[in-house]
Amino acid sequence: MPPTEATLLSAFLLPPAPLQAIVTLKSFAQLFPKSQQSSPQVKALYRDLQNERARITDSVGKNIVAEVKRGNAQRRAVVKARREAEKEEQDDEVDVETALFGRSSNLPISQPHSLTSILPELESAVEDVEDEIRRLDEEAETLLEEMRNTVGGLSDLRYGRLANGQLRQQVLEGLERLEKSCEKK
């Protein structure tokens, strides 16, 4: 079976591995001056890079799904247009002959689907439905994970366990700066 559009796009546009497989934190830190290599900011920058790479990968994956969906819709539109064109291609002379002499054996007759002609159509429809189900399942999983992260973050906030212990102080300092800048104007 030839590769599908989704397979080709995924193989060439999505990275084969997460950032850790490409560059480790240690080798990433070695790109900085010696005095900065052990800085927590380097670790934070590495985490930000990991998150950005994951977001981009997710975005590309969603775009691939959308492109495959557009391609399937275009294919269906082309097939529909061809069918309509075949219906419209009936010659005016044939209409006149039919009106005058009735149906004769040399006129084109529409052929209903046979078992061999309908199977590929049904298989294509099944693939489209399966792709849609797979896309919806992935979207549901993504939403569920986002909801779990949000609930976990809210739980941490409720019990006062913040990832950044200095967040309170930073927020207060930011508010003071904002207040001072508003007073100056």
Image (cartoon, grey):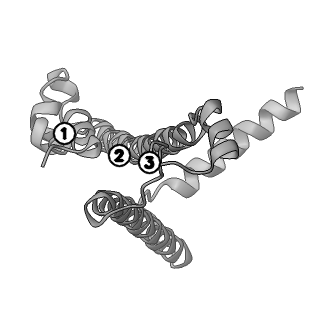
Q: Name the quadrant containing residue 87.
A: top right
**Residue 40 located left or right of residue 184:** left
Q: Quadrant of the C terminus?
A: top right
Residue receiving disc 2: 61
The one of 183 and 137 positioned closer to us in this rendering: 137
Label 1 or label 2, whichever comes before in sequence order: 1
Q: Residue furthest front?
A: 101
The one of 20 and 70 positioned closer to us in this rendering: 70
Identify which residue is drawn at 35% across, 64% down: 122
The tag on residue 11 is 1
Q: Position of residue 80 (x, y in %)?
A: 52, 45
Q: Position of residue 39 (x, y in %)?
A: 25, 36
Residue receiving disc 3: 69
| Mark 3 element type | helix
Using the numbered discs, state the Cα–Cα distance from disc 2 to disc 3 in whole angstroms: 12 Å
Q: Amino acid at mark 3?
A: Lys
Q: Position of residue 125 (x, y in %)?
A: 38, 61
| Mark 1 element type | helix
Label 1 or label 3, whichever comes before in sequence order: 1
